[in-house]
Amino acid sequence: MKIVTEHHGDGAACVVRLNGEVDMVTVPEVREALESAMNRGCANVVLDLARVTYMDSSALGLLVWADRELGPRQGKL
């Protein structure tokens, strides 16, 4: 799993690019990257899944978690 985070503008928006499989093994790593971006002030996250080759149900749970985390920050996934 390769994860690249790019912050844009004032840092309130970022793009998180994932490359590889997102499953129960890699979800903790992706969640950590998303939490780090949010803690640095990123409230609007674009999750680039163009190079993701496989996602399981734990990856879908991660998307729901991220959306719920960004809501109180007036952000969007």
Image: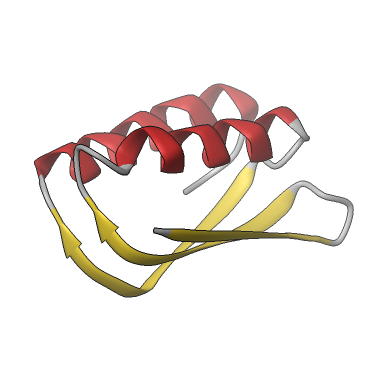
Q: Is residue 55 left or right of residue 34?
A: left
Q: Residue at x 48, y 26 (%)?
A: 69
Viewer-proximal residue among 19 and 12: 19
Q: Residue at x 11, y 49 (%)?
A: 56
Q: Position of residue 18 (x, y in %)?
A: 43, 63
Q: Is residue 37 left or right of residue 33?
A: right
Q: How is the image coloured?
A: secondary structure
Q: Residue furthest left?
A: 57
Q: Position of residue 55 (x, y in %)?
A: 17, 56
All told, the count of numbered labels is: 0
Q: Residue at x 24, y 39 (%)?
A: 25
Q: Residue furthest right?
A: 10
Q: Quadrant of residue 60?
A: top left
Viewer-proximal residue among 75 and 46: 46
Q: Position of residue 33 (x, y in %)?
A: 56, 41
Q: Is residue 65 above or below residue 58?
A: above
Q: Position of residue 10 (x, y in %)?
A: 89, 52
Q: Quadrant of residue 1?
A: bottom left
Q: Is residue 19 left or right of residue 10?
A: left
Q: Is residue 1 above or below residue 60?
A: below
